[in-house]
Image (cartoon, rainbow, N blue to C red):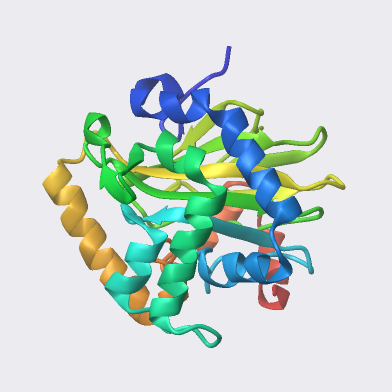
Amino acid sequence: METFNEYHLDPQQFPFLRNIQDNWQAIRDEFTDFTHNASDEELKFAHDVLGPKSKAIKTKGSSKYTAFGILFQGKFIEEYIQLHQIQYPDYQTNHAAEKALALREKYFPNLAKAIGYASEQGSIAQVNSIADNILRNVYFGTFHPGLDIKLHVNDNPHMNRGYLGLIVPEGDVAMRICHDNLYWHEGQFMVLDHSYPHCPHNYTNYDRTVLVVDFFKPDWTREKAIQFEKEQVTERMADNPYSLGVFGQSDRAKEEDFIKYGLAHQLEWDKALT
């Protein structure tokens, strides 16, 4: 049995995750179909537009973390682009939103359905009433071989983060959070409170991909959580619209955290990080 604590949470506490987990193979197959069969232009668009970017969370060396998804701050990506009128170097706002919608409908219908949305007579209707719109961000996250991310926090006190294992190679690919090394498993959720310092890595020769699912903490009132999210996202989008409201400049561990959790050596290479 796994041991749970204040930052490593039992997924069984969150029944609204069950439908996503039950459909993990269909979700994984959509991801692999997209990455193997999408055109180069579609793949470029997904990584340029559909993925949250961080200015604060850094990696050691050249290995990277890539992400793209369909839901941000409780809105489908095409709605989110329009709401915030995001300007891209290679795409006009309306064109980016239209293309995001087309890619979602073409490649990720099972994922959209699993997170509580459905298509009705050609239009999208929200049917996520059982979770009361508790899901905020849903995106694929891939750790490429050799990835080593600096110790950081995610300054999202109103949310927990679930990771549904989709493609998890054998070997040393783990999340270090506080003093624990936690490991992903295909078809299972790992749920963390990311306000605690953590630093994941992938020391294997293969990609690790999970479905990241951010959701409101059940002990926050919905009104309080929505108001906090609104203020936070406004600040983050003003600083970096390509963050999609997921990451911000406050996502930084303190120097004492590096020392407390036995990672003081990371301070030595901090300034050299890419």
Q: In which quadrant is the N terminus drawn? A: top right
Image point 30% across, 66% down: which residue? 233
Picture coordinates of residue 82, whole percent (x, y): 32, 72
Most extreme residue toward the right is: 205
Image point 66% across, 32% down: which residue? 183
Most extreme residue toward the top is: 1
Q: In which quadrant is the C terminus drawn? A: bottom right
Image point 74% across, 65% down: which residue? 60
Most extreme residue toward the bottom is: 89
Closest to the observer, 1 or 196: 1
Image point 55% across, 35% down: which residue? 164
Q: Tell me if I can see residue 44 in this picture.
A: yes
Tally of numbered discs: 0
Q: Is residue 93 above or below residue 56?
A: below
Picture coordinates of residue 231, whole percent (x, y): 22, 66
Closest to the observer, 260 or 115: 115
Picture coordinates of residue 247, whole percent (x, y): 44, 64
Q: Is residue 210 above or below residue 255?
A: above
Picture coordinates of residue 208, whole percent (x, y): 72, 44
Closest to the observer, 257 or 204: 204
Most extreme residue toward the left is: 223
Q: Tell me if I can see residue 235 in this picture.
A: no
Q: Quadrant of residue 93?
A: bottom left
Does residue 183 appear to the left or right of 255 in the view shown? right
